[in-house]
Image (cartoon, grey):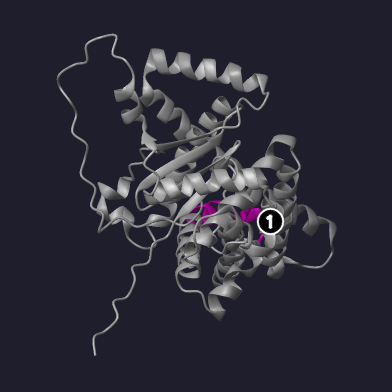
Amino acid sequence: MSKQKKSKYVAVGGQALMEGVMMTGPSGTAIALRLPDQTIETSMKEFKRIKNRIKFLGFPFIRGIVNMVESQVFGYKCLMESAEKTSMDMENTVQESKLDKWISDHFGPKMMSAIGIISAVLGLGLAFLLFSVLPSLVFNGVGSLIAADITPFKALVEGVIRVALFVLYMYAVSTVKEIKRVVQYHGAEHKSIFCFENKLELTVENVRKQKRFHPRCGTSFLFLTILLSIAISALTLTIFPSLAKPENTALWIAVKLLLLPVILSVGYESIMLAGKYPNVFTKILSAPGLWMQRITTKEPDDSMIEVAIAALNASLGVLPQAETEQEKEDKTPELFEKPTAESEEEPQDEAEEEKTPDIGGLAGGAVPT
C-alpha cells in the first residue's frame, strides 16, 4: 500500500491598504487596488528579504523581529502607493506624493527606503514609550498615592495598563473615517485567506461565507506580545524584586527594552504555531487576539472581496494579467535608448523561503494586523 504524500504547508499573509489589499504568497507579493474609475489594478512587488542573503536571520527566535521591521518598512511603502493611486479625496496625499517624487528624483530610491526605515524605527520607538515607559510612570504615580506597598503587583498593574491602552488605541484608529474602509478591506483579506486555506474556489460567494477572524493576524501577534510581556515581566521581577522599586524605574525600563526582542521573538513563533497547527492549545493562545479583531476587522462588501481575491490570486501565480513593474515598463514605448548592461536578479532559494504570518498591518505596519 503506497503512502499518501503529505501536502506542503503554504502560508499566505496580507495587509489592508487604502482601497486595496497586499498579499504575499508562493509567487511573490502582489497588491490589488480599487482605482477611482472602479477598475482593479493588480501588480507584483519585489520584496527581497534579508534572510535570503543572511541565512541565520531566518532562524527561529531570530526571524521574528527581523520580519517585523521588514514588514513595517515594506507595508509603509505599499500604503503610500495605495493612497496616491486611489486618491481618496485626500489633499495631503497629493502633496505628499509630490514630496516623495521630489525626494526620489533628487536623492534616488535609496533615500525613500531610508525614510521607510526611519518611519518604522520611530513607530517602534513611540510604541515603546506608550506601552513600556508610560505604564511604569503611571504605576509610580498610583503607588505614591496609595499607602500600601503595591510593588509585588507591578508587572500585573503595568500589564493591565498596557492592555487598556492597546484596546483604546485600536478602537480610536478604527473610528477614523479613512480607516473604516481599511478595516473592511482587512476583513476581506482574512476571509479570502480562509477560503484558500479551506481549499475552496476563490469566488465572491465562497469568500463571503468565511470568518474574518484569523489566528495568524498581526492584531493577534501584538496582543499576544502584550500578554507575554506581563508573564516575562512578572518572572523577571520575581527574580530581581529590587527592580520594582520607584528609584529603579530607569533601570527597569532599560531591562524591558532588553527583553523586547525576546518577547517579540516568542510571540512570533507562537503565532506561527497557531497558524500552522490548529489545536486546543493554539486556539487558547490565539483567543485574545481573535477577540481584538472584532475591532480591527469589519465585514467587507462584495467589491472589497473582489479586490482581496485579485491580490491573493496574483500572489498564488494564477493571474496572468498580474504584471511586475518591470514587465509594465517593458511594454511602454521606448523614447530613449536603454543601456545595454542589464543587472542580473539574485536567484531565490525557494526551498529555504518561508512564508511569514500576516503581520503586515492594518495601516502600513503602524497598526499590524
Tell me what residue is drawn at x 60 percent, y 32 percent. Answer: 38
Q: Residues within 10 Å of mark 1 (few under 14, many from 20)?
A: many
Q: Residue furthest top?
A: 335
* The one of 119 and 290 positioned closer to us in this rendering: 290
Q: Look at the image and tell me whether residue 172 can be seen.
A: yes
> Which residues lie in the magenta part?
245-259
The kind of secondary structure element at disc 1 is helix
The x and y percentages for residue 357 are 46, 57
Tell me what residue is drawn at x 56 percent, y 80 percent. Answer: 280
Question: In terms of image quadrants, where is residue 235?
Answer: bottom right
The x and y percentages for residue 49 are 34, 45
* The one of 213 and 307 positioned closer to us in this rendering: 307
Left or right of 47, for residue 334: left
Tell me what residue is drawn at x 48 percent, y 33 percent. Answer: 77
Residue at mark 1: 162
Q: Look at the image and tell me whether residue 360 can be seen.
A: no
Up/down of 159 relative to 82, above or below: below
Up/down of 151 relative to 346, above or below: below
Work out which quarter of the rendered image holds the N terminus and state it.
Answer: bottom left
Up/down of 263 relative to 174, above or below: below
Q: Is residue 94 magenta?
A: no
Q: Residue furthest left?
A: 340
Up/down of 172 relative to 78, above or below: below
Tell me which amino acid carries mark 1: Arg
Q: Is residue 254 magenta?
A: yes
The x and y percentages for residue 129 are 62, 44
The x and y percentages for residue 267 are 50, 62
The main secondary structure of the magenta stretch is: helix
- Figure label count: 1
Left or right of 300, for residue 85: left
Question: In terms of image quadrants, where is residue 306?
Answer: top right
